[in-house]
Amino acid sequence: MSNAHGCCKTGPGYASPLEAMSGPRESLIYVTAVYSGTGIEKPDYLATVDVDPNSPTFSTIIHRLPVPFLGDELHHTGWNSCSSCHGDPSAQRRFLIVPALVSGRVYVIDVKTNPKAPSLHKVVDPADIIEKTGLAYPHTSHCLASGEIMISCLGDKDGNAEGNGFLLLDSEFNVKGRWEKPGHSPQYGYDFWYQPRHNTMISTSWGAPKAFTKGFNLEHLSEGLYGRHLHVYDWPGGELRQTLDLGDSGLLPLEASFVIIRFLHDPAKDTGFVGSALTSNMIRFFKNQDGSWSHEVSISVKPLKVQNWILPEMPGLITDFLISLDDRFLYFVNWLHGDIRQYNIEDLKNPKLTGQVWVGGLIQKGSPIVAVTDDGETWQAEVPEIQGKKLRAGPQMIQLSLDGKRLYATNSLFSTWDKQFYPDLVHQGSHIIQIDVDTEKGGLKINPNFFVDFGTEPDGPSLAHEMRYPGGDCTSDIWI
């Protein structure tokens, strides 16, 4: 994909999602790794993982780039340029954009000069961002065809949701201002995706940073500190045109560590999905004939009746999902239940479950927590070990190979939430696993030869979150 990885003679990425599926197999993954909130006084870092099965260092971390500050909470990542810039021969996919969710810094990392050993290029100072825009708590980053970078920010410097909005950086990573027009900020910020052919950007809601950074508290829901809306914007104008209330079935659409928004990859399509973490629903949104937008629940994961947990019922907690580049399959994780699912979505109104695999969770065998059937029988999930290692926590972030045949999963959500729901994870560290995918008939199977253990890191166990390929992937690239 960019000139160093690629198959293109114009700009970075590919001309279409289907063309991207024929791109080269991934050989490296960049992963954000966190010490913030773990008790280890070390900076967070970007880990480079070898995923080339023909390499002698396959399934290991081959490089670590620590950032220069403590307490950042590196979270999600994006690019300075992607397939949205494919038509611009001067554009290069050179820099990984790494917002720090807690500190508000934005790191710009050069991954082109030496893909196996990235280097720090620039740090965007949070004080500069606040002074010029009032924004803090940066989360999702997308590159624009203009060469600018757009980052959703979830609040103001004091953690209030009212100050949230969208940060614009220019191509040299200088603070340019806000993207949305004055008075058109969303009620709550979180994730976003744009679909230029429909002149639309849609953003989702998480909550006020002063609430979610302290962990999950049910009282914060009743206090109105979490959102449940989709915000439909004019693209690229920045005017808020419509707000969709997802109601009780949409509290809360976070990815946020939680659930992201995805349009279908085909830029002509006017539909996509969001995930509602607490109710564990996949919700499809779509454009009406009159130009307005609507939504409907597409997939529901029923809560499990459980014993020995903090509540009598346990939601799946869908914390991430993605769509294959051919728009045939949708994959999502249930962070608390512990399973990854594959659905065929060729019939958008009738998704079909085609694959499911258990890779952790609170109800795996050996846990004190048990699920209870309607008949009163108790059960626990069978979760295999990989290379003699017990799988920890539940699947959290996922990434799919371009050809759709390999799915990677990490298990850390956000340090304060990790400590709350999976306290052992903070002491034992994260891992990355690989799932083999049947793209013909459907189906998921754990690859026993791949296991990357962040519990044995030189500075102590760390928490691994989002993954990126050097040439882009189905969760970073947008086609125009």
Image (cartoon, rainbow, N blue to C red):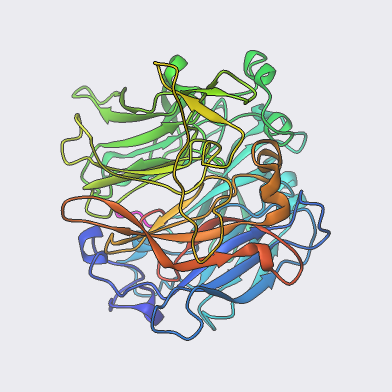
The residue lying at 56 percent from left, 25 percent from top is 187
| Callout count | 0
Q: Quadrant of residue 201?
A: top left
Q: Quadrant of the N terminus?
A: bottom left
Q: Residue at x 27, y 39 (%)?
A: 198
Q: Is residue 38 above or below residue 285?
A: below
Q: Residue at x 21, y 56 (%)?
A: 439
Work out whether residue 424 or residue 33 is closer to the camera in this orientation and state it: 424
* Residue 460 screen position, x and y as percent: 75, 64
In which image quadrant can residue 63 be found? bottom right
**Is residue 185 in view from this perspective?**
no
In percent of width and height, residue 92 lies at: 43, 73
**Range covered by the magenta-colored residues:** 476-480
The answer to whether 256 appears left or right of 260 in the picture is right
Kindly report the secondary structure that dominates the magenta region of the rendered protein. Answer: loop
Residue drawn at 41 percent across, 76 percent down: 27
Tell me where residue 308 appears, x and y as whole percent: 62, 25
Q: Position of residue 213 (x, y in %)?
A: 71, 37
**Residue 261 in sight:** yes
Q: Is residue 410 found left or right of 145 in the rendered image? A: right
- Given residues 293 and 304, the one toward you in this image is 304
In magenta stretch: residue 336 = no
Image vertical order of residue 424 relative to residue 317, above or below: below
- Farthest front residue? 377
Quarter-of-image position of residue 51: bottom left
Instruction: Name the residue nearer the viewer: 157 or 59.
Output: 59
